[in-house]
Image: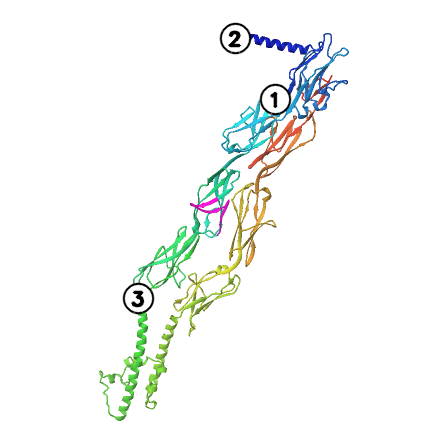
Amino acid sequence: MKADLLISLRMSLTVSLLVLIFISEIVAQDGWAVRYFSKYICAPKGSEVTMRCIYRYPKGHSVPKAFWTKEWGQGSEPPDLSDNPEYRGRVQYLGDEHNDCTLRLSDVREKDQSKYYFRFITDKPGGKNQGRGGVDLSVTDLQVEVPERVIEGDKVTLTCKTTCRLTVRPTLTWHRNGHRLSSRTDQFHLQPVSSEDVGRYHCGVLGQNLLSPEVTLNVRYGPKNISVSISPSGEIVEGSSVNLTCSSDANPPVQNYTWFKGTSLVAEGETYTMKKISSVDSGEYKCRSSNEHGVKYSTALSLDVLYPPKIASLSISPSREIVEGSSVTLTCSSDANPPVQNYTWFKEGGSSPVGSGHSYRALQRGSYYCEAQNEQGSQKSAAVTVSVKEEQAMTLYVVVGVGLCGAAVFITIILLIWRKKKGTMEEDGHQNVDPNAKDDTYTALDPMSRSSDDVYNTLATVHCSPSDDLYSALDPQSRSPEYDTLAADLLISLRMSLTVSLLVLIFISDLQVEVPERVIEGDNVTLTCKTTCSLTVTPTFTWYRNGRSLSSSTDQLHLQPVSREDADRYRCGVLGLTSPEVILNVRYGPKSVSVSISPSGEIVEGSSVNLTCSSDANPPVQNYNWFKGTSLVGKGETYTMKKISSVDSGEYKCKSSNEHGVKYSTALSLDVLYPPRNVSVSNSPSGETAEGTSVNLTCSSDANPPVQNYTWFKEGGSSPVGSGHSYRALQRGSYYCEAQNEHGSQKSAAVTVTVKGVIDGGRILINPQKIIYNTL
């Protein structure tokens, strides 16, 4: 009870004190007084301020004029605030002619910061009074305070600050990238902050045309969304050039890129280039991206290098010689990706296939090879020879033939001796031979009694070399005509023996193909089939290219002029003997020069782009030069443009050169896409406009592709007021446009539409719905 009584007493004393203070200020100066409810006001720029006050004057006076001024009246009469052009249309006297002297000031500006006094004049001489102290008005901007360094995961608070303490705490609004947020206090909390919170922020006063300047919240974070792209896209063929590019979202940008094949480190840098890629480069690749805030790996990219068949080889089963009439199985093996789709079998010396499939059954002797083929190319194996025992019989026949030739010579000598002896006996008459003695050897050899198919007749056709003729050992005077006939036959036999010997010499002679050391495309080139000794006869030669026979039948193959298509494996053959294969290497300048771009598809400003030059040349291209139009912009097989911009749009060419020539690629057109920028608003007509008329606002922007949507806003509002390239403004205010294409958007600076006041009946009308103040 005592406590309640004490509280009641304190409240009564407080009220009494306030009344006494108020009355003292009102009745000061003998009944003249002005009371300001607030002597200090802090207001945001663009807001509306109400300066409340009351005044008193002695009885018997009336007040014909009451006004506010910024000057303290000493001597001369201070100017009326409403007469100042800078305040026209913004001040409104809400008081009366009795005791209320309240003033409202709208659209507060920075220049409005000052002291304001109320002054009134009565109808009595000397009836003037001006309230001392006045109202001190401070004008402040709104500013968003952002921490200097923000890392993802931190607890972050954005604060909307003023340079003075607001007299009235307004309801604040927050915006990010032009979109209104839910917070309505002077603080906006992001707890925890993430990379998604990056954007442009500003605060404002609800219901008023007051916004702070935009500030950017920069959130730092480690690498995210790591991905690997490959160029050129599609199938990767052995021998081509391949670029792997690592992309990552990070702030600050990734400082280190490291490439791994499996668990092995293979390279560093944003792009990993493999020139002349081979099958050993197949595998899984990962990119590791790192900055000061973290490290992250990409998912594995599987690289599958396609290549034509290689290491084609043959196996034979059984491996030993076969007997005439049996067969062997030949099996073809090859390494290829994709696996070999077709195996084709050939027999050397023929141009048509003899079989197909992984295996082939050979029934005849000869040299066989296979051709392995997939969609990337083909390769022939080395030939294997199938030997048949029948060939040994042929060798035996030759040996037997030579032996028979020797036996014929021996028998002929015996016959000659016998003939000579017989002739001597006939002359002496000592011998009388019975012609009917069929079994007598001498009788059988008698020329008078032998038939045409007689053994003697058979032996008489075998001839031996005249250089060994035994007739020279006999007495020429004792020879009969038959002896001369036998000598001729012996000479023919000897010549046949020498022919067999010559063939044997040919078979043991080696063959070699002679190729010029340095062959340049366009030269006249001759390949020559040579032996280790000079052949006595001129046989028919056979030429082979990559296992297929050619039309030339001499010891020379002419390629006039030679081209790069003639580069291949060549060999020659004669009388069943073939030379080892030799490679014809044709040198030529760059051909088929082309440019590929990575990544493929649309090129957006800020991305990284690689241009890669490809060329067919022998020796490989030594110098690559890049041109944009006619200007040299880079060197090397790959030209990289990091953080590409619109100024990089244009036509690019690659110049490839080696010691044999120079060639340019066709031009590649690079079109860089980017969001709107340099957005601006122009108005027509310019300057102030009369109430009831309109202003055409036009939005302009640089963008690629061109801007697709223009949206118009009035400052202080969150909803669009119009769309399209132009907008017709009917009310005063500040307007801006937002230009947008598929790559982003940008807002223009605001332009202010000012409407002239219209004087009507002593009142100034800024808006037909509002009467601002009386000028009388």
Q: Is residue 500 above or below residue 91?
A: below
The colouring scheme, among rainbow, by chain, secondary structure or one colour, is rainbow
Instruction: Name the amino acid, label 2.
Output: Ala
Q: In front: 199, or 207?
A: 199
Main SS category, magenta section: strand
Q: Which mark, residue 166?
A: 1
Q: Which residues are magenta?
A: 258-275
Q: Nearer the viewer, mark 3 or mark 2?
A: 2
Residue 765 percent location from the top left of the image = 69, 21
Work out how far the residue at label 2 is from the one at label 1, CA to CA, in angstroms: 37 Å
Q: Which residue position holds label 2?
A: 3
Q: Earlier in the sequence, mark 2 or mark 1?
A: 2
Q: In this orientation, does residue 400 appear?
A: yes
Q: Quadrant of the C terminus?
A: top right
Q: Residue at x 57, y 24 (%)?
A: 172
Residue 367 position in % (x across, y down):
37, 63
The picture places residue 130, in percent across and down from the top left corner, at 72, 15
The mark nearer the N terminus, 3 or 2, is 2
**Helix, strand or loop at disc 2?**
helix
- Name the residue nearer the viewer: 222 or 675: 222
Query: Does 263 lie within the magenta span?
Result: yes
Foreground label between 2 and 1: 2
22 relative position to 302: left or right: right
* Res 714 quadrant in image: top right
* Three-letter code for the amino acid on which mark 1 is drawn: Leu
Q: How many angstroms separate mark 1 from mark 3 (CA)?
A: 117 Å
**What element does badge 3 sit on?**
loop
